[in-house]
Amino acid sequence: MFDSMNLRKEILNALHEMGFDEPTEVQKQVIPLELEGKDVVVKSKTGSGKTAAFVIPILNGLEKNEKQAAMIITPTRELALQVTDVVREIGKHMQLKAVTIYGGASINYQIREIKNGANIIIGTPGRLIDLMKRRELTTDSIRFLVLDEVDIMLDMGFIDDIKYILSKLPKSRQTMFFSATIPEEIKHITLNYTNSPVNINISGGEVTVSTIQHFYSIANGHDKFSTLLAYLDEKKPEKAIIFCKTQRNAERIHLIMQNLGMQAVLMHGGLSQNRREHSLNMFKEGINMLIATNVASRGLDIDNVSDIINFDAETDPKAYVHRVGRSARMGKSGRAFTIFTPAEKYLVYEIENYAKIKLSPLEFNLSTYREKMNEFYKGDSRHEVESALRRSNFNPNRGFGGRNKPYRKEFSNNNDRHYSGFKKGSRFKRNYFKED
C-alpha cells in the first residue's frame, strides 16, 4: 500500500484520486530505496509502472524553492511528454513546476519556462545539451537524475550524449537508471556514474511477449492489404497499432483506409511534432487504429492496445519484440499479427527462436476483400491516393512545403490533413520517403 510508504499527504491524495491504491511490483521494490536516497539500476519491462516508481520519490523529496533540482532524460519527445503528464498528475496538489524540453519545439519558449522557475526538467538528450551549452540550463543544483528507457537511448545512438550530460552534473546527486534490458555498455555507465547503486531485476524485466498470442499470414502484392482488411474484419481489434517499415507505406495505408471509410490516425518521423502529438491524443481518446513506423515502438506508453499488426515485417527479431511489446501492458493479454511475404517466411523461425514463442498461421478467405480492393484500384479513390503521394513535397528532414508551396486536401471526416506540393508533372522522388 502507498499509505505505508511515508509519502506526503498531497501525493497520497493524488494517487487515491487516480485510483492507484496498490503499488505495482517495481514500485514496491524501488520506491522505498529511492526514498532512502539510494542510487538504483532497475531492470523492468516497459508498461510495468516504472514511471511512477521514479516520479513519486522525486516529488516527495522536492521543495517549492528548489529550482532545476531534478532532471529526467527520455529517448523520445513523446515519452518526455508522457512523463510530464504523470509528474503533473501525481504532483497536482503540490506547487512544483515541470518543464518539457525536446527538439522540434520553440527553444525560446522552453528557455522562458525554465527561467520562470522550473523544479523538474524532463527532456531528450539533444535539446538538453543544446540548452546546457547555451548556459540557459544550469546543472549545479540537480539533486535527482533519472535516465528512462536507457536501452532505447543506446539503440538510438544517444550514448555519447548521455555521457556528456552525466559529466556535467553534481557528483552528489541521486541517480536512477531504468531499462528493459541491461547491455554491457549500460553496465559500464552505471559503474562510472552512480554511487554504490542497488541493482533491481524485476521478474520478467526484459520486454516479454509471453502473454501475447502471435499469428501470421503469408501474402504478397495487393493481397497484403486484403489480408489486413480480413484480419480487421474478422478479429475486430478494440485498439490496434499497424506498423509499416517506411513513411511512404504508412501514408499510403492511411489514405487508403480513410478512402474506404475506416477511421485511423497516422504517426511517423516525417510529421511535425504538433501533428504527432495530435495523432497520439486522438488514438488515446477514441480512434481505435494508429498507423505508424517504428517511431511508435520506441518508448511510447499507450494503454489498452489489444492488437499489434505488422503490415511490414521487421527483419530483426529484437525489433519484433519491441513492436509487439506495445500490447499486453500491465499484465494484460494481447495479440500480434504479422504479414510476411513469401521471401520473408524464414523470419517466422528466427522470431520464434529469439523470443521463445510460437507464431500460429492464420488463413483467410480473401475473395471478398480482393473484390473490395479491385474496386478501389479501378476507381477514382486510387488515383486520389496515388496522386497525393506523387505530388507530396515531403522530406523527413524539412517536413512539408519547401521550394513549392503546399496545398491541402481533406481525406477524412476528422480534419486529418495531408499536404502536397510538387509542380504538376514533376516526378515522384522516392528518397523523400526514407525509413525511420
Image (cartoon, rainbow, N blue to C red):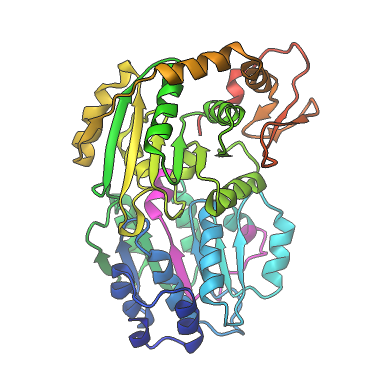
In front of the other: 331 or 150? 331
Which quarter of the figure has residue 252? top right
Q: In which quadrant is the N terminus drawn?
A: bottom left
Q: Quadrant of residue 243?
A: top left
Residue 408 image-quadrant placement: top right
Residue 109 is situated, as x and y percent measured from the top left of the image, at: 73, 60
Q: Which of the two residues, 89 or 283, is positioned nearer the viewer here?
A: 283
Horizontal side of 387 relative to 336 (left or right) equals right
**How far across and how far down the image is residue 342, in percent?**
31, 16
Residue ranking furthest to the front: 368
Say which residue appears at 33% left-offset and 42% top-offset. 335
Q: Residue 54, how many percent across, how many down?
A: 42, 70
Query: Can the viewer see residue 168?
Result: no
Q: In the rendered structure, which segment of residues is drawn in magenta?
A: 131-156
Q: Report the residue at 38% width, 33% height from top.
A: 234
Q: From the top left corner, tell me how far across and down residue 38 is, in percent.
A: 34, 77
Q: Give 26 or 194, whichever is nearer the viewer.
A: 26
Q: Is residue 141 magenta?
A: yes
Image mark count: 0
**Residue 63 in magenta stretch:** no
Question: Is residue 287 among what the camera can see?
Answer: yes
Image side of residue 364 versus residue 260, left or right: left
